[in-house]
Image (cartoon, rainbow, N blue to C red):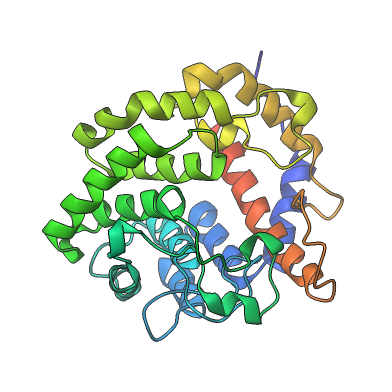
């Protein structure tokens, strides 16, 4: 099957939405990635979500509106910083890593609370209610360990060694390998760790991909892990496995663009109905930027 084609008007509508209706963060990130805009503009907008403890909150993840820092929002910030190719000299990187080190629960290697108790004081999606019993090793700890490798200059060597061994053990022996949010964290881990570490978990990751990716077009209108979230480009390590379903999904993605040029989240909160429209609008910017990234990676949109 060939690669689908995006009409010029569709691209123009998407860009117009990002420039006129997205959050300043996604607007400046689009300018950086597609128009050669300055990274400093993105840093400025990302800084608005940062707290004094170095962590991030303040609705950076639109479904989580609490001001307090969280491991979840801080990993989202680091994803943005990695897009910018920010190095360990970045003050935002330093603060984020220091926050995560301080927030690590050393009790029985419990990992991180994905969200703090303060989330229950603010509007949120119901899946972000605080859960004191949450074992964060699959999500977000695996991704955090990957970030610690990328910024290893900022992480005590002993801690990194300990976390690496625990991550390998978790993936190979504890994980049920059926949670796609966990898989996304594992894939980010895989992008950042040395090959010697990746080789120890690759068979388990292959099994997770087989279990978690939705390849049936009839299920793509719901909330699921899509082929292009795993095979993000033809250079992905999983492209050969998912190439046909990825091409099919790209065609589906083009049909889901809305009249305003954006892509909208296929979920809702079912609560806080006065706040959800704002979160939904913010998600539209996030998802539209991500759609253009994937379309560009597959040669459907040019830089």
Image quadrant containing the C terminus: top right
Q: Provide residue 166's location: percent of width, then percent of height.
A: 27, 46
Q: Provide residue 78's location: percent of width, then percent of height.
A: 40, 61
Q: Which residue is nearer to you in this view: 252 or 302?
A: 252
Q: Which residue is nearer to you in this view: 34 or 127?
A: 127
Q: Residue at x 73, y 59 (%)?
A: 16
Residue 245, image quadrant: top right
- Is residue 234 at least partly visible in the picture? no
Name the residue furthest bottom.
52
Up/down of 93 relative to 79, above or below: below
Up/down of 272 relative to 300, above or below: below
Name the residue furthest top.
1
Residue 168, image quadrant: top left
Image quadrant containing the N terminus: top right
Up/down of 23 relative to 223, above or below: below
- Is residue 194 at least partly visible in the picture? yes
Q: Residue at x 25, y 30 (%)?
A: 200
Up/down of 191 relative to 20, above or below: above
Q: Which residue is nearer to you in this view: 107 or 288?
A: 107
């Amino acid at each position: 099957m060939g690669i689908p084609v995006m009409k010029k008007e569709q691209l123009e509508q998407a860009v117009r939405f990002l420039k006129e209706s997205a959050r300043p963060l996604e607007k400046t990130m689009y300018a950086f990635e597609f128009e050669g805009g300055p990274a400093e503009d993105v840093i400025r907008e990302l800084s608005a979500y940062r707290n004094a403890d170095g962590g991030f909150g303040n609705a950076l993840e639109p479904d989580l509106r609490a001001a307090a820092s969280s491991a979840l929002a801080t990993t989202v910030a680091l994803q943005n910083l990695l897009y910018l190719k920010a190095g360990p000299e970045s003050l935002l990187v330093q603060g984020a890593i220091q926050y995560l080190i301080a927030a690590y629960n050393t009790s029985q290697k419990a990992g991180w609370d994905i969200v703090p108790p303060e989330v229950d004081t603010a509007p949120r999606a119901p899946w972000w209610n605080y859960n004191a019993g949450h074992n964060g090793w699959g999500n977000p700890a695996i991704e955090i360990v990957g970030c610690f490798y990328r910024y290893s200059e900022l992480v005590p060597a002993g801690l990194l060694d300990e976390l690496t061994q625990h991550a390998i053990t978790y993936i190979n022996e504890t994980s049920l390998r059926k949670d796609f949010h966990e898989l996304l964290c594992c894939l980010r881990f895989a992008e950042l760790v040395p090959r010697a570490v990746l080789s120890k978990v690759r068979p388990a990751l292959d099994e997770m991909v087989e279990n978690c990716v939705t390849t049936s077009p009839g299920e793509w209108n719901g909330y699921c892990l899509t082929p292009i979230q795993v095979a993000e480009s033809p250079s992905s390590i999983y492209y050969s496995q998912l190439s046909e379903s990825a091409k099919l999904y790209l065609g589906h993605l083009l049909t889901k663009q809305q009249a305003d040029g954006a892509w909208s989240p296929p979920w809702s909160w079912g609560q806080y109905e006065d706040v959800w429209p704002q979160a939904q609008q913010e998600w539209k910017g996030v998802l539209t930027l991500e759609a253009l990234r994937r379309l560009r990676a597959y040669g459907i949109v040019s830089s």
